[in-house]
Structures are given as C-alpha cells and as structure tokens.
Amino acid sequence: MLKVTIDGQTLEVEAGSTVLQSALRLGIDIPTFCYMKRLPALASCRMCLVEIEGLRRLQPSCATAVTDGMVVRTNTPLIEETRSSMLDMLLANHPLDCPICDKGGECELQDMVMAYGPRESQFRDDKRVFHSEDIRLSPVIIMNVNRCIQCQRCVRMCEEVVGAVALGTVEKGMDTAVTGFEGSLASCDQCGNCVEVCPVGALMSFPYRYKARPWDLVETDTVCPHCGTGCQLTVGTRKGEFMRARSKWDEGVNHETLCVRGRFGLDFVASRDRIKQPMIRHDGALVPVSWDEAGDYLRRRLLAVESKDAGGLASPRLPNEVLYQFQKLMRTVFRTNNIDCSSRWAAPFDTLGPLLGTFYSRTPLDDVIGSDCVLVVGGNITEENPVTEYLLRDGARRRQTGLLMLSARPSRLDADARVVVRVPPGGEAASLAAVVAGLVAAAGQALPGGAFADIDAAIGRPAAGAGSDEPDRLAAALKEGRSVTVLVSVDLLRSPEARATLQQLNNLLHVLRLLGKGPAMQFLFDRANQMGAWDMGLLPAALPGLRAVADDAARATLARNWGAEIPSEPGANLDAMLELCVGGRMGALYIVGTDPLVAYPDRDFVTRALGAADLLIVQDAFLTDTAGMAEVVLPAAGYGEESGTFTNNEGRIQKVRKFREPVFEARGNLAIVDFVAALRNQALRPSTQAEIFDEIARLVPAYQGLTQDGLGADGAFTKAVPTLPAGVFLAPPPVPTAADRLMLITGDCLFHNGYLSERSDILNTVANDPYVAMSAQDTAELGLSDGDQVIVRSGQGELTAQLKVDRRFPKGLVFVPENYRALRLNSLLRRGEYPCAVEVQKAHATLEVDRPGRIWRGV
C-alpha cells in the first residue's frame, strides 16, 4: 500500500492507483472532460491538472500514478487560473445556444463554467462554425458539431467499449470534428452510448429532441425489459408520458451503457396495439365487454371445462411476483403442474436442475468475467446480450481475460477471442464432448484418484469433425487457464439436442472442477426474467426454488403454506399441452404475456392446437396473434405499469418500478390472477406485490433472507442452493452434416428480441427490414447478391425477405431473425426438428433441386 496526501488528507491506496481515483475516494472533486472510468486515461482535456510537491509543472491527475509519500494540492491559485483558461478556450468557439440545447440543465460544460470558468472571456474573434445546421447522423442520433469540445469520449466509447468503430475524427487541432463514415451512422449499432457520454449537446437523441427539459422530467430507476443482462436504466416521463431512457455509471451491471433496445426501445409502452378492455368471443368475433361481464362469462366456461386438463403458459418478461402467483394459481386452483414459461423451446429439467444447482454462479458478471478464461457457448452474444458483450470485450482488452468462442453463428466478439470454434448448428453437444475428451487427454494423470479412468471410460473419444483440431485447441486453452467461466446462450435450448448439450456442459464443468479451475457457469438469457421464471417454479417438473415436483418434502412445505395440496406428478410442457389440445383433452389453456402462435415452431400445428382447446384465455397488454384466437381476452398492465422484481442472468434480483398508470381498462397482472381465482371460488393469499415478495423470500431457498428494503440501486444477489451433482454422461454421436445442405437457424437480431420491441416505433425506424443472412460462398454458388429478395423454402412453408451477405458466416448456414411477425418464420419450422433444411432462391427465379436440400441456380 502507498500513502498519499491530498489537500491535507492522507490515504492509503494500492499501487497503480491514480491521483484522480485517490481524490475521489476522499470526496475531493477534480473536474474532468475526457476521463472515463472504464477506459485508460487520455489526459487530453487538461481540466484535471493538479500540483504535486517536488514537480515543477502541473500534472494530469487522471494519468498520474500515486507514489509513496506523494503530496498533492488540487485547489491553488495556479490551478484555478489554469482551469479558467482552459474553459475560456473551449468557450471561444462554443455556441451560446443553451436555451435551445437539449443538454441544457445537465450539461457538464455549463456546470464547469459556473464552478471554475472566467467571468469574462479574453477572446474576441468570430466563433468557428463547422455547419450552420445540425447533422442527422442516423434516425436516432443528431449532431451539432459546433458544440463539440473534442473530449473524444464518444469515439472511445464506440470503439473500445461497444466495438462498433462507427465514429471517428477528421482534421486536427481546433479544427477537429467528430463524425460518422461519410457523415452517416447508418451501419452502427444505434445504441446511443455516444449520446450518453457526450458532456455537451454535440450528440443528441433525435427522438427526445425538444420534447422536454431535464427539470420537467419525473425520473424512475428501473430495469430494462429486453434481455437477461438486467441493465439499470432511468426512465424519464413528463405528465405521465414516456420521454427517454438513460443510464448511470455507478448503478447496475451495465456501467452507464445500454444497447439500442434499452435506450430507444421503451416507447413500446405507448403502442397503439394495446388491448383496451376485456373481450369475449361471440359469433366468431371478439366483442368488448365490461370486467363484470367477462367475469360472469368466464365463470360459466371454467365450470363447464373443469373435468378436463388445464394448462398455463406465462412470459419470462413478467415480474417474479406475478410468475410466482401464476404458478400457485395453476397448482392450487386449477390443480395441475401443466406449466411452462417459454413459447420457443422446452427446458429438460432432469439435466437442467443438477447443472444449475451444482455449477451456476450467482455472483456479479464482473467477477466471473475476471476469470482467466471465459468460454462462450452458442448463440450470438453481440445481438442477444449486447451489454454483456461490452463487458466481455473490456475483460479481453483491459484485464487480459482469455475469450474462447464455440458457436454456429459468428459474433463481433470473435475478433477479441483467443480461440474460435465454429460448429454446425445442432452439433454443439458433439463438439463439447470432443472438447471434454481433449481436456481429459491433455490432463492425463493430473486428474485425482480414479476419476481419470472413470471419465475416460464414460466419454470415449468422440469426433467433432473430420480433420478438425479446433476442439483440441480449445481444450488446451482451458487446461492452461487458472480459472474458467462458461457463459451459455439459452439459444441452445431450441435444439432437440438440448438435453445432450446440457449433459456435455455438465461433463465439461465436472472435469474443470476436478482440475482445480473453480468453474463458474451462467446462462445468457434473452428474456429479462427467465432466471426468475425458473426460480419461481414455471416449469412442469419443478416447484419454486427449482425443487422437483416429485420431492415430497418440498411439496408438503408449500402445501402447508398455501393451504392446498399440490399434484405430485410432473406436468406437461408447452409442446405436450398443445398435444393435449389437439387430442381434445385440454379444458382451459391460460396464456399470460406471450405469443406462442408467432414463436413456437410449426405455426399450423399451434393454430390447430389453440383452436382445439375448449377454453383459451389470454391475458396480455397487446393484441397478439394468440390473443386474436382466444375465447376470453383480459387486458393487463404492461411494462412500467406495475412494480415487482426481475432476476437477471447473474442471479441478481432488482426492482422493476412503475412509472406510468395502466391505460384504458387494463388491470395489474396480480389483480387479474386474483380475479380468475375468485371465479373458481378460491382466494390466493397473499395477493399484494410486497407480501408475495416476502413469501418468496421465506419459501424459495435461493431468496431466503432478502427484503425489499435491502434491494438497493444494485439489487441483491440470490444464493446458490447446491443439489446432488449429476454423473458423467456418455458422448453423443456426431450430428451428420452434408456440405450441400443449407440449414436454417433463428434467434434474436440486434434491434428486436420479441414482440415488445417490434411495437417500438423508434426501433422500427432503425431496424433493418426482415432479412436472410448467408455466407458469401453460398450466395456466390447460388448466383445471389447482397440486397436481393430471396425465397427461403422448407418442407413446411416459405418466406420472402432481403438477402444480407455475411462474410463471417460459415458455409451451409442460413439465419433468419425470429422477431418479425409478418415473416411467420415458425411456419417453416417443424416441431422437434432444428435446425431446418431449406432451399434458397432469388425471388421470381426458377429453382431446380436434384435432391432435398441441394440447390442449383435456375437458368
């Protein structure tokens, strides 16, 4: 430890600490413009100059490391004069248009001038003017380059944090100007992080421009609803109307950054597609009714179908309290374990449960990224969890974390990775098995006791691909690492091979633990509360706390507290519930906040199933395709219209706060669950959000001891609850692949991830049109060009969209985002088959096929 004295106060700091960091710990304010906490010092603005005893010149505190015994002064006449002169130089060319500048009232330059600036300028020359009008760099970002103070924060944020490299500078000296390529940001992520860090009004949010002043806004700290990273954001409203979203450096996992969905995609709350009042189906059409009329009708219908099975599906975007109460309703009032929380895939709890209980690390992402190696498995983290990608890039570049990638889709993070293993879609299990075998072989007798022989006998030596040495390279990198974190895309659960993939992940983590790597694992969820949904028991085979339905003790504890018995047999997942519908055995199917008709594979099957249910109840804020088929539609509060909690990928539980009132006749989701229970002449206790949270904290082991008051700005971490570890699983056979087959996969795209984002007018101004992504090699062979309209056809159906050639894509891969309702992508997919073999041709061209999946260009 080193001793430093700043303005008479003495402090002990670690070696490598800067004067600025030390002053902040003492509560001493030193002004800065170019400094960013998450990046190395630039020391260009010279606002943070300080006097250091023994040195003749003033030194930049942001870039000066503390030495033992250093004496620093931060507020002397020389420093005051220097700061004033620097501000005078900045104001010499700065337009004095504060009354119309969107940054007015929260402008760092304004604050600095008031605190340290001259009262009269020494400059009398005309101000330099770059442009007479503001430049629209993109649909969401507008620039007034005349206001720029050349701090370079925006450029560094874009390049070093986001990794987009969309902003740069031209010219030099006082003529330096920040701009996008050819004056445009058309190819950037549109995340707006440059706007967030701009200290003045040079970069502005176009959707927020001229809408409000900071002092007009009522600001509410809450959590982003768009993915499982769980970013903190602050929502600004004016007279109850949504104005903007921003973030704060000192709160949340995201450290001031947001992605495009989080910053610009919250206007979906004001969508014109809201359900205004309850509706019931009459003569084949949905007819608006009052809540009392809906209740009377629903009571009769529930009574008529109570002899048949019931089932429930709820969205993992809903708060924990709603999900907990919904599964309690289904288990105690409807007397069924037919419960699920995903409309896109099924989670095999028999392998998922032991994996979560044994290896899941409910700790800060910053800590797990601090491991020596981080292996990212599956998906495309750039588009599914953008802010997590920012943090991983920071780990790779600044903390020397070894990034290892294993996936079918490329991501921007590949450029920072030490090893990239490209696997065929659906082949993740076989590739992981090959990595495990390579790790065991490389470890040799380093494995303790008889573990080596046992594991080696169980896994054998699978082949990941003919002539491929990539799994061995990955195994070698994992063996060399001192500690290992595995981040797993939930996208892997789409595949019929999901169980095998989870088993091989278990094998990998088991071997890493035996090798002393202290492995940690976290999922990369693309829904805001997927972890919470699992914890709350929204699984057909799991009770709250991820305890098996067959666990007599767990059932008895809940039954005693709930005052009702719980069925002992595991229930049906969504796919099995749809089968029950088709078989005429489903009485009431209750769907809350999700749209399986758009998301679940095989649209025709889902349509038949929903139509065959005796009673389809849909509770939602928006009139979805599924709601359009319902017999009873109940208008629910949307995001921002009710309070609760989310549990993010880290296991961090955070408050989701209300910032607007429910519109039209919508009611809170908890109130509607109580309403439905009352129709069955039962009551759910407790029924308020605060009381339900307390019950969760009492009955769900991972949440025990938590209090709402204890959820500060950063939330609180749930606890890992160990379960019996699974054994070692056999390696699966490699997935057969053929070089002449095109395989379709799907997932999130950067601008959309589900039906909430597609209802954002702002996102729809920046989002690409629906597209089909393919490799340059495949498109060249098919005679296709970037931008062509192409037809993608499977044995189930077809769609037409614009082609996007991605030179990083592997041969044979076709990607179509799942988030465009108009495409009806799930019409191409068949249940239980993923990826999907497809043919691709240019729209209006002929196509010749000599065998399924092999395509020749028509002539």
Image: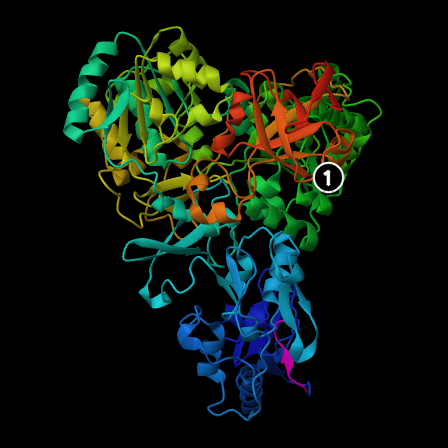
State the colouring used for the structure image.
rainbow
Q: Is residue 48 visible?
A: yes
Q: Tell me the SS state at disc 1.
A: loop
Q: Name the residue type under label 1.
A: Arg
As drawn, which residue projects farthest toward the right? 467
Q: Is residue 39 visible?
A: no
Decide which of 853, 61 is in the foreground and name it. 853
Q: From this view, report whether residue 715 is shown above or below residue 582.
A: below
- Magenta residues, dominant SS class: loop
Measured from the top left, where is residue 809 in percent x and y?
71, 35
Write the start and end of the magenta stretch as one range: 57-63
Q: Badge 1 is on which residue?
A: 808
Please tell me whether residue 300 is drawn above or below residue 517 in the rendered image. Answer: above
Residue 420 or residue 537, whichever sits in front = 420
Task: Give the number of marks.
Answer: 1
Quadrant (top left, top right, bottom left, bottom right) of the C terminus? top right
* Residue 559 image offset from top left, x and y in percent: 29, 20
Residue 502 image point, x, y percent: 60, 24
Q: Quadrant of the N terminus?
A: bottom right
Depth check: 659 or 730 in front?
A: 659
Q: For residue 61: magenta?
A: yes
Q: Residue at x 44, y 82 (%)?
A: 114
Q: Quadrant of residue 377?
A: top right
